[in-house]
Amino acid sequence: MPPPRAAILRVAVAGPLPGLFDYLPPTDADTRPLVPGTRLLVPFGRGQRVGMLVEFAESSEQEPDRLKPVAAVLDARALLGPADLALIRWAAEYYRSPLGEALFGALPVRLRRADARLDLDLPGLRPSAAGLALDLAALGRAPAQRRVMECLRAAPQGLGTLALKDRLGSCAGPLKALRDLGLIEACRVAAGPVPVPAALPDPATPYPAGPDLNPEQRRAVAAVSAAWGGFAPCVLDGVTGSGKTEVYIRLIAEAIAAGRQALVLVPEIGLTPQLRDRLEQRLPGPHAVLHSALPEAERERAWHSAAAGHATLVLGTRSACFVPLPRLGLIVVDEEHDASLKQQEGFRYSARDLAVRRAQQAACPVILGSATPS
């Protein structure tokens, strides 16, 4: 139950500023209860800055007449949950970094600005009135277009573009043709958590069946599988081409089958396309990919997909270690020895070490794969 609105709000201000700053609740008519992890616009010096509510206090060391009320609440809900805040606060203390710098470094770039509002919807597509009235037999000579229309007509309220791609693969050509015909239209789809299915698939069955595992791979899968439900750091030692990725895939499939999310960290952007292709061919989605070479809007959509529980798998470089994952069940750090997993500017950290700490907090296994383990 949230504290009363009369409580002191302790806020981390964006930037390399030590400590937390005390504020009073906003004086406007907004009566929504404030929750830690929510962005706030606060008076700071002669201007205003964006900050994040971290905790409540019953009193302040500042004189009561010096406390100012929050200027505005920027978000309708918290961006970071209790587990996310706990991880980032631990990291800021461990690496001796200002908490505000660490918190806002974990957010999408746009949401670090005071003028950015949280978008609770995701871009999507839906059938137009003409598309709903269309006799699908008319698309008999365009089977790819017909598959798209069947998929969208099964969700007439709209389907997110990431979910559509996950179901049908790359379908840019058919989508353009259907737009030109006026059969589909853009829309916004409400972001919400994906419910865990009532009947889970058999976790022993991959999606789809891959190559037969050799004895060492089977032992590795069995060792991690035996640790489900608890913290277990596991080093997967194998030279390039020895089959580490197949072990990852089998274990991620088990996590997804159990209704959990998986996080895969890689050291270099160049490693993501090939690995992404393998994962998408074998594992149910939707998947989210996060790295600095992607456009900001695409990275933010992937971040929201993961935070809302939509993405079953998140694949990214070092900053992805902070992405909110409400159903986290497995972490994989590929090439864990690589120096690229260390952030060297601004808020400095080791994504490999933070992955281990996050797995400890989430009580889940973490796999550290390498040909030259550190």
Image (spheres, rainbow, N blue to C red):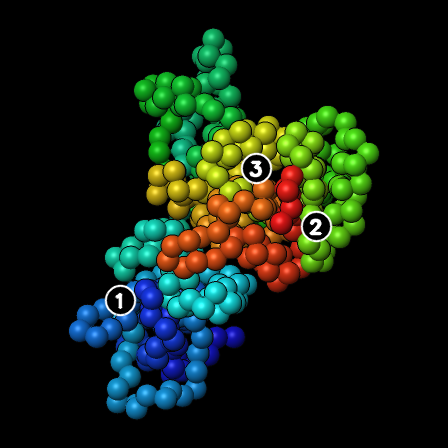
Picture mark count? 3
Q: Is 214 on the left-hand or right-hand side of 49?
A: right
Q: Measured along the vertical axis of the image, is residue 32 above or below residue 216?
A: below
Under tag 3, what secondary structure? loop
Residue 41, how many percent across, how many down? Answer: 29, 67
Which residue in the structure is indicated by mark 2? 234
The residue most toward the left is 46
Crowding at dot 1, Cα within 10 Å, few <14 / some 14-19 / many 20+, comes out as some
Considering depth in this image, is 295 or 368 the residue closer to the camera? 368
Q: Measured along the vertical axis of the image, is residue 269 above or below residue 46?
A: above
Under tag 1, what secondary structure? strand
Mark 1 or 3, nearer chain start: 1
Determine contact: label 2, label 1, CB under 8 Å. no
The residue most toward the top is 141
Residue 125, how many percent across, how many down? Answer: 40, 33
Eye-nearest disc, 2 or 3: 2
Residue that appears at 43% across and 58% down: 348
